[in-house]
Image (cartoon, helix red, strand yellow):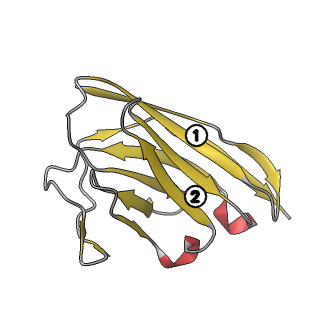
Amino acid sequence: QVHLVESGGGSVQSGGSLRLSCAASGDVPSSMSMAWFRQAAGKYREGVATIDDDGSAVYVDYVKGRFTISRDKAENILYLQMNNLTPEDTAMYYCAADSPDGRTVEDGIWVSYDYNYWGQGTQVTVSS
């Protein structure tokens, strides 16, 4: 079992930045993919970015150029640096880990949105 805990959310004004963190603990596999998802009020959960164990990463179009996903494998921490935030980025952000499909990135495409473990989320609120 892997336990994921997100942190770093908060309230910022439009154009501001936040850095989210996700700490993984427990029986962390030596190799696993990790990702960020988000869910705004009244909307479905959507993917934000994924990163495989080899560092391959994919971003959805609406965050490209503004968000950066990274990981510290030694410490089992996943990050999401979010810049130039807009009110449309307001959502609960969730960390996910360990896709049963193994890799989630193939030829620059996010091919699997299935993950075994999920965190409880951290709220991001962006005001105009």
**Which residue is nearer to you in this view: 51 or 119?**
51
Mark 2 residue type:
Ala
Which residue shows up at 82% across the image and 63% down it?
14
Secondary structure at numbered mark 2? loop
Which residue shows up at 72% across the image and 63% down it?
85
Instruction: Name the disc covering residue 40, or none.
Output: 2
Quadrant of the image occupied by residue 32: top left
Location of the N terminus by quadrant is top left
Q: Label 2 neighbourhood size at 10 Å, few (<14), some (14-19), many (20+)?
A: some
Secondary structure at numbered mark 1? strand
* Residue 116 shown left or right of residue 77 in the figure: left
Residue 38 picture location, percent across and down: 50, 55
Mark 1 residue type:
Thr
Which residue shows up at 47% across the image and 46% down it?
94
Instruction: Name the disc covering residue 32, or none.
Output: none
Q: Which of the marked residues, 2 or 1, is nearer the chain's N terminus?
A: 2
Quadrant of the image occupied by residue 86: bottom right
Instruction: Name the disc covering residue 122, or none.
Output: 1
Count of numbered marks? 2
